Amino acid sequence: MKLSETKHRATLVLAVKGRIDTETAKEFGDELLARIKTQGIDKVVLDFSGVDFISSACLRELMINFKHAREAKVALLVAAMQPMVLEIFQLSRFDTIMPCLATIEQALKTQVALQSTPAKGARDTNSVVVHFWGTRGSLPAPLTLQQLRNKLASALVAGAGMNLDTIERANSFVESLPFHIGGTYGGNSSCVELSAHDNNVVLLDLGSGARLAGQDALRRLAGRSGEFHIFMSHLHWDHIMGFPFFTPAYIPGQRIRIYGCHDQLENAFRRQQAEPSFPVDLSKMASHIEFVHLELGRSYHIAGYQVSTKLQQHHGDSYGYRFEKNGKCVVYSTDAEYKPENMINIQECVELFQDADLVIFDAMYSLADSVSVKEDWGHSSNIMGVELCQQAHAKRLALVHHEPANDDAAIGRSYHDALRLEELTRQGERLEIYSAYDGLEIQL
């Protein structure tokens, strides 16, 4: 392997020739890092026109140096790859991370977004957007093969005799199908995101949906450091299981604050990642992680939201949250049970929900189950959700924490039952009801 360099103002072109394999990768990485650290350089272009082979060791060095370049605010690009080398690069999905240009000329002209550039897809700071990343309760419940086949069979029967000979026509037909056939509520456990300003990310619980939430947040941050504010309803496993797979926690420069009312907040997260449960101890995560204890009865100003809490009836206690911003209010109330003999608890719940623009509500069971075989299990129903929101004059209700044993059709029936009850008992403004699914986004 041989290297030579030329300089074009603040851009350095490093031409590499030969093979970059296990034997030469470390030397290549060290040489590249030295160029990245060169004073007065804001872009390094790797000319790979003379490279006839790269191994995984080369790609590892590229990734390490790509991170170093980001930290140093130096753009790192690859250009002029030979066909086989380019294919290896693409098979490893490195083209989704690192800019790869066809020619050196293109690389010299390309402007790369660094940390000062606004993130692509940044949200309007004046609105409140609620995104559901995980809506299942108790444990993840992915779609099974048989459930998928049942959906396909139902769709084929519904489309019999129709002209569906183009993708456009087929997509239009799928859109017209009932949601339990043409869509799915998803299988990830609890995780909801509230839109925030600047580089702030606000999440509610860290179930398995947190993996996708973290990846999407990093995409929007586009290399910048973020402030992650995570509010925990409680510490049962289905609400924390996503954190070991929350990518921002592994990235230096990211700041993560985990808020909750439980005394064992930090201990629960540390225990989850201690041996033998997980191979990476929480202390090895490279981000700055902080645990913040919240007190009942106090109001906090966090990430642009006014935040207050309420104790809820659930084994080990859970806490509901009220978030207020720009005249909008979102209430997050999962893992809570309401009993007629505890009217104080119900009245406090109504006060928490009062005039909310959106109430996110645990509707895991039917009312019959929640007052019989599943009484004292710490969850509620679609019926209670409608009644409480009507008493509180809330505008919207999102049913979440779906029973993992229920398929999409069963969840759909629960949703339609809630719609019908609201229609039968409506006395003022209509309560808008959603049965939340993984990927649903509601703008307030």
Image (spheres, rainbow, N blue to C red):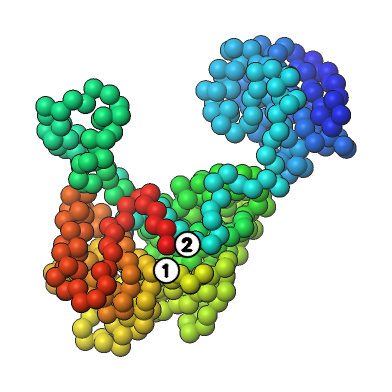
Pointer 1: residues within 10 angstroms few (<14), some, or many (20+)?
many
Tell me, yes or no, if residue 375 can be seen here. no
Give me the residue at 26% from left, 65% from top.
363
Per the image, label 2 sits on a secondary structure element best described as loop
Quarter of the image where the N terminus is located: top right
Q: Position of residue 167 (x, y in %)?
A: 30, 27
Marker count (numbered): 2
Instruction: Kindly indicate the quadrant of the structure image that contains residue 183.
Output: top left
Q: Position of residue 121 (x, y in %)?
A: 54, 46
Q: Earlier in the sequence, mark 2 or mark 1?
A: 2
Residue under label 2:
128
Please name the amino acid that badge 1 sits on: Val
Pointer 2: residues within 10 angstroms few (<14), some, or many (20+)?
many
Residue under label 1:
330
Observer-nearest of 15 and 163: 163
The answer for how far apart the CA atoms under marks 2 and 1 are is 9 Å
| Disc 2 and disc 1 in contact, CB within 8 angstroms | yes
Observer-nearest of 161 and 148: 161
Up-down: is 66 above or below 346? Answer: above
Q: Position of residue 134 (x, y in %)?
A: 37, 54
Instruction: Kindly indicate the quadrant of the structure image that contains residue 192.
Output: bottom left
Per the image, label 1 sits on a secondary structure element best described as strand
Give me the residue at 58% from left, 27% from top.
95
